[in-house]
Amino acid sequence: MSYIGRFAPSPSGPLHFGSLIAALGSYFQAKAHQGQWLVRIEDLDPPREMPGAATLILQTLEAYHLYWDGEVVYQSKRHELYQSQIERWLKSGQAYYCQCTRKQIKALGGFYTGTCRDLGLTHQDQCAIRLCMTQPVYQFDDKRHGKLTIPTSLANEDFIIKRRDGLFAYNLAVVLDDIDQGVTEVVRGADLIEPTGRQISLYKMLDRTPVNYLHLPLALDTNGHKLSKQNHAKAVNNDNPKPALLDAMQFLGFDTTEEIRRSSIDEIIEWGVQNWHVTQLPSSTEITPLFSNRSL
């Protein structure tokens, strides 16, 4: 099977150093396997999105010469795919309506225990929709970190596939999209290790073979917080991309020479493809880069 990878940012802001790492890691892994690298904009949550962010993200990828294959896919245009699967599960009894609030679940210990599973609620009751967990995943193999364990309570939980506000859940959409686009491996940040268990469960419930997973280390700021849009991580520089590009490659374990550092963006990217090895990645899942003042 030919390799198909993807980069799937949410448009809640411009790309920062942490998301550049994810973009580069997924790109190098795909191109080192002579594969395709797709880009999908995960615009499932309009209240959290920044106007114009999707365009800014694509402009940044182009500025760093990370050119995608095929057309960009937008999740906001794929609601019919998600809803049709939910309808099939509701009809079969695999999914059900749930009226429990986050506050109620937190008061019961933080994990949902199936309170509404047999109540026969309908969409008229201001409910979310949950999926009955029949294929729990307690551990999985990561291409860099080996066998990773998912907490039992999380693995067994009937999780939400459509929120009470009508928005589709990330876990559902990402799996249906990866299947539809033929993705063979997912390369992304280590902050998504726990959702991976649920996503593998979805593959099994859909009678599909799960993709491979490679989780990249997270870049932390000097206070030990994950770089994220919520933590106000600054956007990478589109006008002068080389410094952040070289810093991100150093973070990913490349040992760049002075000759490479003097090269053009295209030459640096091509060198990265030719010299990429998963074993070069740091073994830690969280790292505070020494060059944080330059690129974070």
Image (spheres, grey):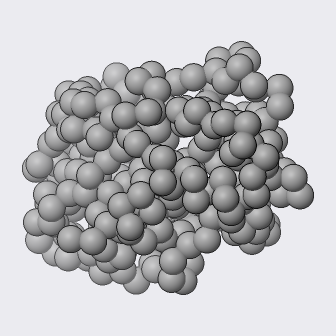
Residue 3 rendering spot, x and y as whole percentages: 32, 66
Residue 39 rendering spot, x and y as whole percentages: 53, 69
Q: Which residue is drawn at 17% across and 34% down?
A: 138
Residue 289 rendering spot, x and y as whole percentages: 67, 24
Q: In this view, does 7 lie above or below 111?
A: below
Tell me the quarter of the image containing the C terminus: top right
Q: Is residue 285 left or right of residue 252?
A: left
Q: Give the image quarter of residue 219.
A: top right
Q: Which of 291 and 163 is in front in this view?
A: 291
Q: Which residue is drawn at 77% across and 64% down?
A: 63
| Residue 166 appears in view | no
| Residue 32 appears in view | yes
Extreme residue in the top direction: 223
Q: Give the image quarter of residue 139.
A: top left
Q: Which of 278 and 113 is in front in this view?
A: 278
Tell me the quarter of the image containing the N terminus: bottom left
Extreme residue in the front direction: 259
Q: Is residue 121 above or below residue 84?
A: above
Q: Which residue is drawn at 57% across and 23% down?
A: 287
Q: Residue at x 73, y 58 (%)?
A: 265
Q: Is residue 224 above or below residue 201?
A: above
Q: Is residue 293 left or right of residue 60?
A: right
For the image shown, how many numbered marks are present on the structure? 0
Q: In this view, does 243 lie above or below 10?
A: above
Q: Is residue 190 left or right of residue 230?
A: left
Q: Is residue 58 left or right of residue 184?
A: right
Residue 54 rendering spot, x and y as whole percentages: 70, 68
Q: Give the image quarter of residue 215.
A: top left
